[in-house]
Amino acid sequence: MNNKLLSLLWIIVSAAIPAMAQHVYTVDTRPGTAVQPTAYGIFFEDINFGADGGLYAELVANRSFECPNALSSWQTIGNVRIGTDRPAFSRNPHYAILESSGHAERKTMIENHGYFGMGLRKGMTYGLSLYGRVNDGGTSRLVVQLVGNNGKVQSHDTLTIDGTPWKCYKTSLRSETNDAGGYLRILLVSPDGCDIDHISLMPDDNWNGLRSDLVADLADLHPGVFRFPGGCIVEGADLATRYQWKNTVGAVEDRPQNENRWAYSYSNKYFPSYYQSYGLGFYEYFLLAEHIGAEPLPVLNCGMACQYQNRNPKNVFDANVPVEDLQPYINDALDLIEFANGSVTSAWGRLRAEMGHPKPFNLKYIAIGNEQWGALYPERLEPIIKAVRKKYPDIKIIGSSGPSADGSNFKYGWNEMRRLKADLVDEHYYKDPNWFLNNARRYDKYDRKGPKVFAGEYACKVRSRRNTFESALAEAAFMTGLDRNSDIVHMATYAPLFANANGYQWSPDLIWFDNMTSVRTPNWYVQQIFSTTHGTHKLTLTEDGHDIAGEDSLYASATWDKDTRQIVVKVVNASLSPRTITLRFKGSRSIKPKSALAFHGNDNDENSLRNKSNIVPKDINAPTMDGNSTQVVLPGRTFGVYTFTK
Ligand code: AHR
């Protein structure tokens, strides 16, 4: 083809594109059905070192010497051994015994490098505490040092341990530099030795024991609901190691450490010390929910251990409690509601008050079971539901539809949840971008009379498993379908929430961090946009009378907020070429444009710990009105958010 012909063809094609890409959307400004405040939220699980080594700000790993190898995460020199005789804490009975070598040059000391090094920040002070005793009633001296990666001591102090009864000793250590690879050293400097336990080092800027930067990452999402503590860790690799919330409340020193079900799932790394200290336990979860303004949604074990890990039929009796032995599981549910909501004179309400929160947490929801499938689940769920309904008829109960988004187990699960009259059904889907685009209509035909939907775990997985713009855009397109179906989908939470960049095994994840900082993924920005724009009511947005869910690669929703009097129109252009859309408002003559955002990028764009703002939504000029209409142009691969007032 010669050049002249090529140019002519290009002119014809270019002229044709705008004509093809013109759309007229009608937004009916009369408020439709109410949107739940819980519409978009967060799901936290201790996976990828999300709790210990993550959100929980403790810097010392294996601080209570309770790992199966009691000295894992510790380096020792000299006379260091483990004891259990007359322990400081009955449920964490191991402690370290430090004795002098009897030789001036041969030191006795222990060092802890935390989780992939301790993140030290310039000018930050770190509260050190430990429990100590001297067995024969004398005194013993310890030097505690905060050390940089280069071996330079940042600060130090001497603790004098005296007397036989266990006592808590405290000091503060300051870092003079930023250092991702710091560590703690404890050196015996007296002839007399001592026993030490529960060695803790916390940055002073922690929020109730949690990393304040990661708490801010959650608060800035403005989540409406907060599901915790998992996920598969609720189920455990076996019933003995399931998550038991009662072990996670009360004094942190006496919360018995548990293994982490995810310790088994690292294919190319071995983490012998992936354990749950429970320093971040149910009380802290409730506090956090209150702080970030989200409804707490605890998940409890239903009498079944992880079904993936117990597929061998021989395990069936170990992995699933017999129905007649379910009472402790039923009690866990009833007692949890009392812990959260009971008066301070009730047994569990008193514990909550003693921990510092006399006011109830106003728990409204509980989930029983995580990813359960098959008949074993409803058999166990039914008696738990009956007991909860009897004592607490107002609590909303969430049941599971299993690990798949469709298929026979999913259908069976849903039918059983209908039979048991669960209030909401938890659905999980980790799928590719096409699935998300093709499922923007997933909920259009759901039965409006049965249980509501909780999309409790979902994430778009691209081939690289990275948090790319492509994955975020596909989620945004899908989520316009959640907006449109907010009458049936009452909650949705992306999963997983956190990943420690040095210790993850599951990706993608919403927030990545190392021991110095964190990064918000493109997916985080999509979640934030939806949680801050779902409004109080749904609006109808149509083109030629039908919803927009993939027609010409466009996806759209509109919402109304009665408190701010704002209308938000969200449009995703999933194609590679621009689209021009006329928005025509019906039912009001006083629509004013307020602001607009465009989230636009290339499919492989990502944010990283070193380049956090590589791809973020940008403010753009608000569109101008022409009477009751306005025109917006969305470049290819763009998520546009347009706010108007009425
Ligand atoms: O979010 C990660 C895991 O995915 C959850 O623990 C589990 O429920 C699902 O399989």
Image (spheres, rainbow, N blue to C red):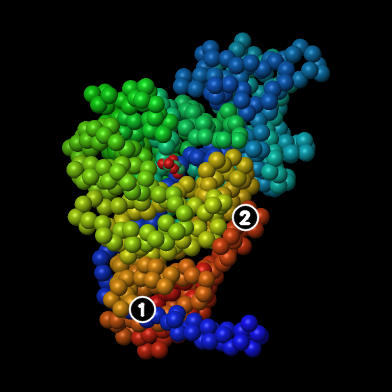
**For numbered disc 1, what is the local secondary structure?**
strand
Q: Quadrant of residue 479?
A: bottom left
In the rendered image, the residue lying farthest to the top is 136
Q: Which mark is residue 608?
A: 2
Tell me if residue 80 comes above or below residue 155 in the rendering: above
The image quadrant where one finds ligand 1 is top left
Instruction: Name which residue type carries label 1.
Output: Tyr
Q: Is residue 138 above or below residue 72?
A: above
Label total for image: 2
Kind of residue indicated by mark 2: Ser
- Mark 1 C-beta closer than 8 Å to ligand 1: no
> 290 or 47, which is in the foreground?
47
At 49% from the left and 22% from the top, the residue drawn is 92
| Residue at the image point whose x is 45% and y is 59% from the top | 434
Instruction: First in sequence, mark 1 or 2: give its number.
Output: 1
- Quadrant assignment for the N terminus: bottom right
Q: Residue 74 falls in which quadrant of the image? A: top right
Q: Which residue is labeled 1 in the image?
A: 25
Locate residue 327 relative to residue 191 in the image: left or right.
left
